[in-house]
């Protein structure tokens, strides 16, 4: 995948999400997101960290969290959410939308996955629609399925994913799951909310593990 193309996609999605966030009201920011225990405010704070996290900072965070990656990410997001209000975070997010920096150990497609998925983590609990562009979503989905970081290979073992809005399918087995690529991306990243838009024998199975 061409890196300049991925950077262009990521910048556009970040700027689009920043515009989306401009329309949120005060109470929206305290709404629980799809990320368990995280508010919308926390998720936006986390998004601003992807271009600001350094390797020494990450190591220090891991020590604080006693090696728990998810705890480290949560603690960092909560600290940043406490330090900056919504308008400040939106400005920071917009300011670095085109940045080539990314978190240590992350791949070029990870920031795109981050903004696509977290955009849904924010929008869906607020009953708002944030469309996911087809080509970008398929590229993100391919990356998630191939990467060991997201745990998708274990989660989706024996499940065949079929996109209903694109000419795309992956996986083997009789447990087929059919739905929009955006919902398949949510399932691949462990979000049960993706089940609302899919069908097939594999959907029930995933419902038991998500």
Image (cartoon, rainbow, N blue to C red):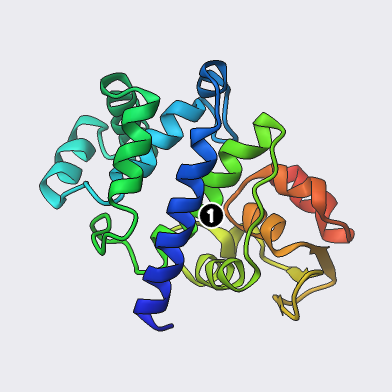
Q: Can residue 45 be seen in the rendering of this structure?
A: yes
Relative placement, left or right, of 56 versus 201 is left
Vertical placement of 81 versus 115: above or below? above
The residue to which callout 1 is attached is 116
Which residue in the rendered view is the most extreme toward the right? 200
Quadrant location of the N terminus in the rendered image: bottom left
Point out the image quarter for the C terminus.
top right
21, above or below 1, in the image: above
User: As rendered, which of 40 and 88 lies closer to the eye?
Assistant: 88
The residue sitting at 56% across, 69% down in the picture is: 136
| Residue 39 pos. (x, y %) | 50, 25
Q: Secondary structure at mark 1?
A: helix
Disc 1 residue crowd, few under 14, some 14–19, many 20+, Cα 10 Å? many
Q: Nearer the viewer, residue 181 or 60?
A: 181
Residue 97: percent from the left, percent from the top? Answer: 34, 54
Q: Residue 133, percent across and down?
A: 62, 64
């Amino acid at each position: 995948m061409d890196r300049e193309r991925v950077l262009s996609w990521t910048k556009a999605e970040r700027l689009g999400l920043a515009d989306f966030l401009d329309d949120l009201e005060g109470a929206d920011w305290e709404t629980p997101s799809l990320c368990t225990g995280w508010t919308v405010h926390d998720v936006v704070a986390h998004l601003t960290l992807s271009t600001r996290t350094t390797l020494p900072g990450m190591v220090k965070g891991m020590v604080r969290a006693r090696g728990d990656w998810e705890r480290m990410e949560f603690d960092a997001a909560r600290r940043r959410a406490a330090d900056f209000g919504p308008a400040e975070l939106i400005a920071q997010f917009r300011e670095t939308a085109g940045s080539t920096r990314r978190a240590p150990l992350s791949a070029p497609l990870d920031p795109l996955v981050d903004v696509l998925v977290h955009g849904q983590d924010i929008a869906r609990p607020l009953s708002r629609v944030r469309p996911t562009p087809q080509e970008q979503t398929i590229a993100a989905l391919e990356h998630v399925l191939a990467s060991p970081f997201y745990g998708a290979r274990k989660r989706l073992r024996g499940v065949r994913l079929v996109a209903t809005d694109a000419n795309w399918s992956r996986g083997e087995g009789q447990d087929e799951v059919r739905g929009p690529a955006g919902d398949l991306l949510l399932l691949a990243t462990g979000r049960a909310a993706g089940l609302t838009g899919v069908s097939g024998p594999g959907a029930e199975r995933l419902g038991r593990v998500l």
